[in-house]
């Protein structure tokens, strides 16, 4: 039995039945990291001391006859934009290379309180800006299924770690698709809850009106367990919602007969033919499960990329103003005065994509352009949100591809930023509307290499339970292997 | 091309970013093309549409105001722990105002 290939519940059962200890599970994962991470490069930093301490605590609790929490002994990786006290938090940026987190994000705190064993911090696009993890200020991460290809991004390290059996589950952040798209590229389940479902405290801000923390896992059940653990009101984040958190796991294993599933016509054009085939088979399977499939229209879809990139860069330019070499992070040497210090620190500390986005965001907010770009985009955001809310009056779930293309090769889209942005077309819309979304594997492309295709399910605000139930039914009906 | 090199330099100045002449040359066509794509939004008539700054949902029960009670926060030592140049309990920066001779 390979301890690194299991999902949460079977692993938990092994611990409770005393067939294996939490220490052994942690050790097996660090050994797997030792073997595999030289080529995948998912981790920026490991924390064996913290992990073994937690694992040993779990083993003692069991020995003392205490009941174990649902995630007890489960090895988890955390994207390096989410603070874990005492560990470096770099955001994969040189400007924060030496920054040590002074507190735990509640998402991390709640995972550890539920018994999870944090193994380390994972690579990503610098400040979560990118769709491939190639924008990391340190090194790119590779897709474990095909090392020549990207794992997706920006949470590519968190996806690759789970896909390469170097963690059972992980935390990522999703601003415009940064969990859902790498989940699709790596053959995992990845979920973004409703905006405000999970506290953003301790998540380094990129675009505050769009940022989410969310889980990756090998099964819908694992993702349900993770989300259930980290969700809920947190007084440190005024945008975190007071809506009670349902028992998502208890809501699984139910039939989905009669649920109305909408398929937006705008999301089926411009797909690679093989992605389209896989999605169609996924939709057919949902129909076979008894869902009532109906065509719907989200007429403002074509405007989403422009709208999203105006809003996220505007918010980023403001959020990243704090990196100036004064209070924390890198400070360049050899400057004559304060202004020079700011400029040189930011010149040397930020990578190209971050600079590009700061420039764009500064431009769209600048005097004379604010109304034409930023205010316009905020109005279009209203239209895009209205599309979803009207569609979700009629249907319970919306089904789309997660990405128009499967995992691309490293370097393939790096020369043309706009082409890279376009790859986010199916994920940014839900982010703008603040509705929850999940990506589940739904097949592979036919020709070699077999590239993985993800299907995205979307639902009403705070309808995570139903979203997970449909995803779970799809998985159990063989949806993950639809085409293989 | 609508954007000019001087615009790129001006925006960089606003953003406190030093750019090399090569970076200005690389960014100019990239930013220009991205901004042109963004103008697609002008196809839409939004004169009757309210801007949306934040996600709001009818279902939310959000106590947006909390009681104003003192809470534990960082100690001075913790707050300065990541500072590149801490000094006497402060963040030290290069001289801002010139001394009069």
Image (cartoon, coloured by chain):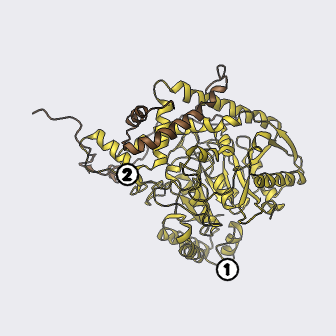
Chain colours: A yellow, B brown
Q: Camera-side residue: A245 or A2? A: A2
Q: Which mark is residue A329?
A: 2
Outermost top residue: B47
Helix, strand or loop under label 2:
loop
Q: Residue at x 70, y 65 (%)?
A: A449
Helix, strand or loop under label 1:
loop
Q: Camera-side residue: A429 or A215? A: A429
The answer to whether residue A285 is left or right of residue A106 is right
Q: Which mark is residue A415?
A: none
Residue A350 in the image: x percent, y percent?
42, 49
Labels 2 and 1 within one chain: yes
Q: Report the chain holding disc 2.
A: A
Q: Report the chain holding disc 1.
A: A
Outermost front residue: B1
Res. A326 visible in picture: no
The answer to whether residue A180 is left or right of residue A477 is left
Tell me if residue A6 comes above or below residue A306 in the rendering.
below
Q: Camera-side residue: B52 or A337? A: A337
The answer to whether residue A411 is left or right of residue A388 is left
Inter-mark Cα distance, 2 to 1: 45 Å
Residue A370 in the image: x percent, y percent?
51, 27
| Label 1 crowd bin: few (<14), some (14–19), many (20+), radius 10 Å | few
Q: According to the image, label 1 marks what residue?
A: A19
Res. A67 visible in picture: yes
């Amino acid at each position: 039995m390979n301890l690194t290939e299991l999902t949460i519940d079977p692993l938990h059962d092994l611990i409770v039945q005393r067939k294996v200890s939490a220490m052994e599970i942690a050790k097996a994962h660090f050994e797997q990291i030792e073997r595999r991470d030289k080529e995948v490069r998912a981790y920026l930093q490991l924390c064996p001391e913290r992990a073994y301490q937690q694992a040993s605590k779990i083993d003692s609790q069991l020995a003392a006859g205490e009941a174990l929490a649902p995630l007890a002994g489960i090895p988890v990786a955390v994207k390096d934009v989410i603070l874990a006290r005492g560990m470096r938090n770099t955001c994969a940026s040189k400007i924060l290379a030496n920054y040590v987190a002074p507190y735990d994000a509640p998402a991390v705190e709640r995972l550890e309180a539920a018994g999870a064993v944090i193994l380390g911090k994972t690579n990503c696009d610098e400040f979560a800006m990118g769709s491939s993890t190639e924008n990391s200020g340190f090194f790119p991460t590779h897709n474990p299924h095909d090392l020549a290809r990207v794992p997706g991004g920006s949470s590519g390290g968190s996806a690759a770690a789970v896909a390469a059996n170097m963690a059972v589950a992980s935390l990522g952040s999703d601003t415009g698709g940064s969990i859902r798209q790498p989940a699709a590229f790596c053959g995992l389940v990845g979920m973004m809850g409703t905006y405000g479902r999970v506290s953003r405290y301790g998540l380094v801000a990129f675009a505050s009106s769009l940022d989410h923390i969310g889980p990756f896992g090998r099964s819908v059940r694992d993702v349900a367990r993770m989300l259930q653990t980290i969700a809920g009101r947190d007084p440190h984040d005024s945008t975190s919602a007071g809506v009670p958190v349902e028992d998502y796991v208890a809501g699984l294993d139910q039939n989905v007969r009669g649920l109305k599933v909408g398929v937006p016509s705008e999301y089926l054009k411009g797909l690679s033919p093989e992605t389209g085939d896989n999605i169609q088979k996924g939709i057919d399977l949902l129909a076979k499960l008894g869902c009532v499939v109906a065509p719907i229209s989200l007429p403002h879809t074509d405007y989403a990329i422009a709208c999203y990139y105006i809003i996220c860069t505007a918010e980023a330019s403001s959020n990243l103003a704090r990196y100036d070499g004064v209070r924390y992070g890198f400070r360049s040497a050899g400057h004559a005065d304060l202004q020079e210090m700011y400029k040189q620190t930011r010149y040397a500390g930020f990578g190209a994509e971050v600079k590009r986005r700061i420039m764009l965001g500064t431009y769209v907010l600048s005097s004379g352009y604010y109304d034409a770009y930023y205010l316009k985009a905020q109005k279009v955001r209203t239209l895009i949100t209205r599309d979803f809310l009207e569609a979700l009056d009629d249907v319970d779930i919306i089904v789309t591809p997660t990405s128009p293309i499967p995992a691309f090769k490293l370097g393939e889209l790096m020369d043309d930023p706009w082409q890279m942005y376009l790859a986010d077309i199916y994920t940014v819309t839900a982010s703008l509307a603040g509705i929850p979304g999940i990506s589940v594997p739904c097949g592979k492309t036919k020709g070699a290499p077999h590239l993985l295709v993800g299907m995205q399910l979307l639902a009403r605000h705070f309808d995570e339970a139903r979203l997970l139930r449909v995803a779970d039914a799809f998985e159990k009906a063989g949806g993950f292997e639809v085409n293989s | 091309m609508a954007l000019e090199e001087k615009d790129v330099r001006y925006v960089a100045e606003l953003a406190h970013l030093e750019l090399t002449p090569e970076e200005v040359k690389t960014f100019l066509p990239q930013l220009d093309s991205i901004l042109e794509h963004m103008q697609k939004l002008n196809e839409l008539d939004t004169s009757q549409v309210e801007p949306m700054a934040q996600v709001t949902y009818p279902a939310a029960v959000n106590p947006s105001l909390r009681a104003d009670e003192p809470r534990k926060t960082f100690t001075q030592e913790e707050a300065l722990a990541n500072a590149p140049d801490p000094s006497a309990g402060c963040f030290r920066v290069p001289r801002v105002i010139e001394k009069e001779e």
